[in-house]
């Protein structure tokens, strides 16, 4: 409820000097929707790092939040710790669905994202496959660090 009230008070141009936002509280999908709406209204436009830890964000919350995150021009670090989203949420973040016949956008997105951390979420092999497609297609061109930990996806086979 606190995140919803905070987000409702954030309008266009709100908190222009904030570059780093950490939320470590249960906000659920409703809080993620409220945060997405605030970002959509032009709040936190200089945000570079967003850490959402133990927020209870499920697929619906990340699906709503993803388009707003892609519109943040300076965003370079996304950290999701101990949230409940899975494959649908991850796919919406890294490889948003296109309308039939639509041309993939050449601008907008997560071009400056250098670090993506997802720990203890419900991402399976299907979500990892969507992530691999996004990486292969150049959707995350600046990504240097990818940290997936504590997810139920099949671990890679060690090379000998």
Image (cartoon, grey):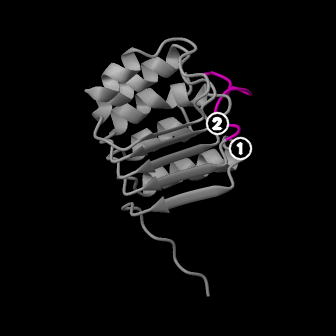
Residue at the spot 44% in from the left edge and 48% down from the top edge:
80
- Residue 62 is labelled as none
Give the side of residue 63 with respect to residue 50, left or right. left
Give the side of residue 63 with respect to residue 42, left or right. left
Category of crowding for the residue at label 1, using alpha-carbon neighbours closer than 10 angstroms: few (below 14), some (14–19), many (at least 20): few
Kindly indicate the quadrant of the structure image that contains residue 15.
top right
Give the side of residue 26 with respect to residue 43, left or right. left
The magenta segment is 101-112
Q: CA distance from mark 1 to mark 2?
A: 10 Å
**How many numbered discs?**
2
Q: Is residue 89 above or below residue 73?
A: below
Mark positioned earlier in the residue sequence (1 or 2): 2
- Residue 35 lies, in percent from the top left, at 42, 25
Query: What SS does tag 2 mark?
Result: loop
Category of crowding for the residue at label 2, using alpha-carbon neighbours closer than 10 angstroms: few (below 14), some (14–19), many (at least 20): many
Nearer-the-camera pick, 21 or 140: 21
Q: Is residue 9 above or below residue 64?
A: above
Q: The N terminus appears in which quarter of the rendering?
A: top left
Label 1 sits on residue = 138
- Residue 113 lies, in percent from the top left, at 65, 43
Do labels 1 and 2 touch, CB within 8 Å? no
Q: Is there any visible trace of residue 97 in the rendered image?
A: no
Label 2 sits on residue = 110
Residue at the spot 36% in from the left edge and 38% down from the top edge:
59
Residue at the spot 68% in from the left edge and 24% down from the top edge:
103
């Amino acid at each position: 409820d606190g995140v919803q009230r905070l987000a409702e008070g954030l309008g266009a141009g709100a908190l222009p000097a904030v570059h780093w936002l950490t939320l470590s509280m249960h906000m659920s999908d409703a809080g993620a929707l409220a945060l997405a709406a605030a970002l959509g209204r032009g709040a936190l436009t200089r945000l570079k790092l967003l850490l959402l830890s133990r927020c209870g964000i499920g697929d619906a919350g990340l699906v709503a939040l993803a388009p707003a995150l892609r519109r943040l021009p300076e965003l370079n670090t996304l950290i999701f710790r101990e949230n409940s989203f899975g494959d649908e949420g991850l796919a919406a973040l890294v490889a948003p669905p296109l309308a039939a016949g639509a041309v993939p956008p050449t601008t907008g997105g997560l071009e400056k994202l250098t670090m993506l951390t997802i720990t203890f979420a419900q991402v399976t092999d299907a979500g990892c496959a969507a992530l691999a497609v996004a990486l292969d297609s150049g959707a995350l061109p600046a990504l240097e660090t990818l940290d997936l930990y504590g997810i139920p996806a099949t671990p890679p086979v060690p090379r000998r």
